Image (cartoon, helix red, strand yellow):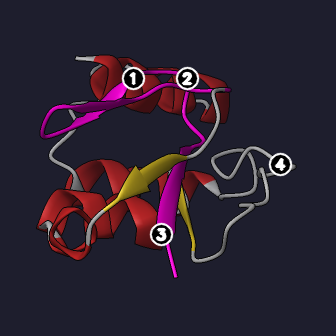
């Protein structure tokens, strides 16, 4: 069965030679892609959605919006994202998304 990743962030995420573009169709990936520690962390934190069928379902909600400020700060720390002066949920999410674009 084929495996796909859907990018739920607002920035492009690169996996090898593949670009996962927000809002685009899910991208076929390999087990090696999925096993990469940064990709596995993004799947665990719902920044990427992994599906294993021929017609992947698109995410309906923004996973970052469902997280608390504490969870967002933990995600940023885990991903080594500098939040700078961000204190509000909106600013923290913006900082995380900006880091995903870079």
Element type where label 1 sits in the image: loop
Residue 14 part of the magenta segment: yes
Residue 20: where, in percent of width, then height?
42, 33
Mark 3 or 2: in front is 3
Marks 3 and 2, how far apart at CA: 22 Å
Is disc 1 in contact with disc 2, using a CB cutoff of under 8 Å?
no
Left-right relation of 33 to 76: left
Disc assigned to residue 12: 1
Left-right relation of 78 to 94: left
Residue 87: where, in percent of width, then height?
50, 30
Mark 3 or 4: in front is 3
- Residue named by callout 4: 61
Left-right relation of 19 to 88: left
Element type where label 3 sits in the image: strand
Marks 3 and 1, how far apart at CA: 19 Å
Residue 23: where, in percent of width, then height?
68, 26
The boundaries of the magenta stretch are 1-23
Dot 1: few (<14), some (14–19), or many (≥20) neighbours within 10 Å?
some
* First reached walking from the N terminus: tag 3 or tag 4: 3
Marks 3 and 4, how far apart at CA: 21 Å
What residue is at 15 percent from the left and 70 percent from the top? 32
């Amino acid at each position: 069965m084929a495996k796909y990743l859907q990018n739920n962030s607002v920035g492009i995420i690169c996996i090898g030679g593949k670009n996962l573009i927000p809002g685009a169709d899910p991208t076929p990936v390999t087990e090696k892609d999925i096993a990469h520690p940064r990709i596995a962390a993004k799947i665990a934190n719902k920044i990427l959605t992994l599906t294993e069928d021929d017609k992947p379902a698109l995410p309906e909600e923004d996973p970052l919006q469902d997280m608390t400020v504490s969870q967002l700060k933990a995600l940023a720390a885990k991903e080594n994202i500098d939040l700078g002066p961000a204190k509000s949920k909106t600013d923290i999410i913006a900082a995380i998304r900006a880091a995903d674009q870079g």
